[in-house]
């Protein structure tokens, strides 16, 4: 049979079964679109996770009340029953962890920031110890970072991201200008370097204030996130984690046979969790596309 005749017969068959042809074509288009969507989302999310992890060095680990990713309701309610981590826990680790080269703590919430009649929506307000900028790999583009004196005295100094500068302050030097966060005035002493966008979300829409000032404003009932940088190599990281675990278990009176009632997480923890999530997500979506 000639090729032209085969094509002619195929077209005649398709024309004779128009509905089936259309439904088959729609199914193929949806399947291909689903595959493209999965690949795009996974690649985008991988970039997001890589960006987040690059904010912390390989020698940085965190101590939190709850896990960064919760897979079921039972885990969520179990974490909710845990005691919060307090500023005193950060101080205990800072003062007693011999394998930790640097220790910091932060608190975070979202609110509006106002200046010159302009307002930003859903800006991150961060309570930082003076060491947190370095632990978050945020460089100061203008002005200065926090000092121990800011933390000790609860000053109303603030460091801002470039969204605050661009959208609220206008032209001119932002250093020394005033902003209001939840109606409370702060003086800008520094501007963090531009972080750009990740998955369309700006990473520059934030204001940082001394953590002691944050707690004076919003209270002392939010759990503190603690960050620590180990001294040296991977072996030092494990020693630092073990030392922090002993300190925290002692402070929280965990029995010898009881599991930790806090989470210690590293970059490897986040990567392992993300690999599980992306694998499950891709399997589910591709399975639906094949139905």
Image (tube, rainbow, N blue to C red):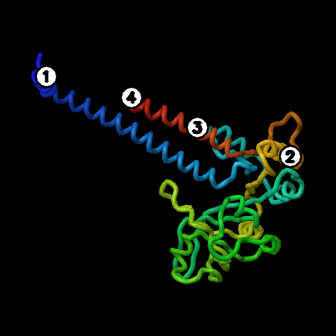
Asked whether the residues under the numbered discs 4 and 1 touch, taking CB atoms below 8 Å apart as contact, a structural biologist would say no
Label 3 sits on residue: 275
What's the distance in space between the residues labelled 3 and 1, CA to CA? Answer: 48 Å
Which of the marked residues, 4 or 2, is nearer the chain's N terminus? 2
Label 2 sits on residue: 243
Which of the marked residues, 3 or 4, is nearer the chain's N terminus? 3
What SS does tag 4 mark?
Answer: loop
Asked whether the residues under the numbered discs 3 and 2 touch, taking CB atoms below 8 Å apart as contact, a structural biologist would say no
Q: Residues within 10 Å of mark 4 (few under 14, many from 20)?
A: few
Q: Quadrant of the N terminus?
A: top left
- Give the mark count: 4
Mark sitting on residue 3: 1
**Mark toward the viewer: 3 or 1:** 1
Mark sitting on residue 290: 4
Asked whether the residues under the numbered discs 4 and 2 touch, taking CB atoms below 8 Å apart as contact, a structural biologist would say no
**Mark toward the viewer: 3 or 4:** 3
What's the distance in space between the residues labelled 3 and 4, CA to CA? Answer: 22 Å
When asked about the image quadrant of residue 191, the answer is: bottom right
Which of the marked residues, 3 or 2, is nearer the chain's N terminus? 2
What's the distance in space between the residues labelled 4 and 1, CA to CA? Answer: 31 Å
Please name the residue shown 33% across and 36% down the image. Answer: 30
Q: Is residue 184 visible?
A: no
């Amino acid at each position: 049979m000639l090729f032209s005749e085969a094509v002619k017969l195929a077209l005649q068959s398709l024309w004779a079964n128009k509905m089936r042809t259309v439904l088959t074509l729609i199914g193929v288009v949806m399947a291909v679109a689903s595959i493209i969507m999965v690949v795009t989302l996974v690649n985008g999310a991988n970039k997001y996770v890589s960006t987040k992890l690059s904010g912390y060095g390989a020698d940085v680990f965190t101590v939190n009340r709850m896990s960064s990713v919760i897979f079921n309701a039972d885990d969520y309610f179990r974490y909710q029953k845990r005691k919060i981590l307090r500023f005193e826990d950060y101080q205990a680790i800072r003062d007693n962890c011999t394998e930790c080269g640097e220790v910091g703590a932060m608190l975070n919430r979202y609110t509006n920031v106002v200046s010159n009649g302009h307002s930003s929506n859903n800006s991150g307000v961060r309570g930082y110890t003076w060491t947190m900028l370095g632990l978050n790999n945020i460089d100061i583009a203008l002005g200065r970072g926090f000092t121990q004196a800011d933390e000790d005295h609860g000053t109303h100094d603030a460091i801002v991201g470039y969204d605050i500068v661009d959208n609220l302050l206008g032209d001119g030097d932002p250093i020394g200008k005033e902003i209001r966060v939840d109606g409370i005035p702060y003086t800008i002493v520094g501007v963090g370097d531009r972080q750009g966008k990740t998955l369309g979300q700006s990473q520059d829409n934030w204001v940082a204030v001394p953590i002691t000032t944050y707690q004076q404003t919003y209270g002392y009932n939010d759990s503190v996130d603690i960050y620590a940088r180990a001294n040296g190599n991977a072996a030092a990281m494990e020693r630092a984690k073990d030392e922090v675990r002993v300190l925290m278990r002692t402070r929280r009176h965990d029995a010898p046979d009881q599991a930790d009632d806090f989470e210690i997480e590293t970059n490897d923890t986040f990567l392992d969790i993300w690999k599980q999530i992306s694998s499950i997500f891709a399997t589910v979506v591709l399975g639906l596309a094949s139905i």
